[in-house]
Image: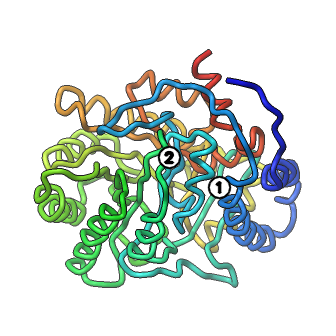
Amino acid sequence: CTKSKYNFTKQEIISRLESKLRPIMTKIPNELFVSFYSNQKKKFLQNFAADYSKFDLEIENYPPLKIWDLEFSFPLFNSAGMFKKAEAYYTVAKQGAGAWLAGTSTGLKRQGNFRNGVLHPFSAFPRSGSSLNWMGLPNESHEVLAKRISRLEKQKGTPIGVSLSTDSVVSEKKALELLVDGLKTYEKAGVDFFEINESCPNVQEGHEIINDRLDESLIKRLEFISENFIKVKDKRSPLIVKLSLDTDIDLIDPMVKILIDLGFDGINLGNTSTNYSEIEKQININERNLFNHFIKTFGGGASGRPLKNKSLNLASKAVQASNNTSSEFKIIRTGGIENVEDLKSSLNKGIKINQWYTGYFSAFSIYGHKLYNHFKKQMIS
């Protein structure tokens, strides 16, 4: 990799400064902190998406992964919810991300959650490496995002993925029809792989989270998708299902078998967690008041470092369940990924693909747009 002069962008500088100030800011009134970060998060992402034209970077060489006949330049990329408007593809591709995932989108446009004067509530807990959000799947619909994606020029080593969910404000039959229509629309737009989001805790009218039993309504939804999309196409884009990190580990074996039997191509474990009592134990004592304020006011899903062990255990169990059944069925780990040690832990357990969200922004505040380069160097050394 040839060394060249690198000029930091405004977003890199802002992120670095903000990371220094954030622990101090958690001391301001809880309502003010949540309101401020909920607004600033959206503004930051808008400007971040345009950063691709403001930096030039030599990408570190790393052996690409060939999965589902797709080439992933690295075993790590963003999770759903980061780029809800299908923005920033060129920025993360230029950084050297393994892939890019847009959404989650629904058939009908959703405004998302609003309470106490806060739209899309979000709060960070910097000392704990965690965050909470109660966004409620805000998005512009499958159709709008598909049109935007269709105009993208694909970058080598950065496949395009999309996360989809069923609509919760229509009948289940109509919701499933909209979902399948969305899959077909995205496929025409050139999407390389899909992720069905069955794990969001932030939709008031939404699905039950799988806990200690198999959810019969979930199985019926998966059967509908299989019968109306997977089995009717000779050639199609890979389709995976994302389940909650609150899923009971004893349900992983039967769930993986069901997904393989129905023709799905992988499982993502998982998303945020609502196991507040367990997560609170891992929240820094100086941030627990803010943590409890958020869950009492909004609820929402927790992400980041407190989910590290849970995501590794569940994904590892899924690898074991899929062994000797389908070499094309892949396991994705999401939750608590923040450093190279986490990626190596995944690899040692046979988990080849990882997604991150909270950890991404922490790493960006340190390494800026060079974050994937930093990880690649550490993985090779």
- Identify the residue under disc 1: 131
Q: Which residue occupies the foreground of this view, 30 or 164?
A: 164
Residue 116 horizontal/vertical position (percent):
68, 83
Residue drawn at x 26%, y 45% as measured from the top left:
265
Residue 94 horizontal/vertical position (percent):
62, 44
Residue 94 shows up from this direction: yes
Task: In the displayed orientation, state which residue is furthest to the top.
Answer: 381
- The amino acid sitting under disc 2 is Gln
Question: As displayed, is residue 191 above or below residue 56?
Answer: below
Within 10 Å of disc 2 (Cα), the crowding (few <14, some 14-19, many 20+) is some
- Identify the residue under disc 2: 155
- The amino acid sitting under disc 1 is Ser
Disc 1 to disc 2, C-alpha distance: 31 Å
Question: Would residue 333 appear left or right of 6 to someone viewing this image?
Answer: left
Q: Say which quarter of the image contains residue 190.
A: bottom left
Residue 346 horizontal/vertical position (percent):
47, 29
Residue 185 horizontal/vertical position (percent):
31, 69
Question: As displayed, is residue 16 above or below residue 124?
Answer: above
Q: Which residue occupies the foreground of this view, 205 or 180?
A: 180
Quadrant the N terminus occupies: top right
Residue drawn at x 51%, y 36% as measured from the top left:
309
Question: Would residue 311 appear left or right of 229 to someone viewing this image?
Answer: right
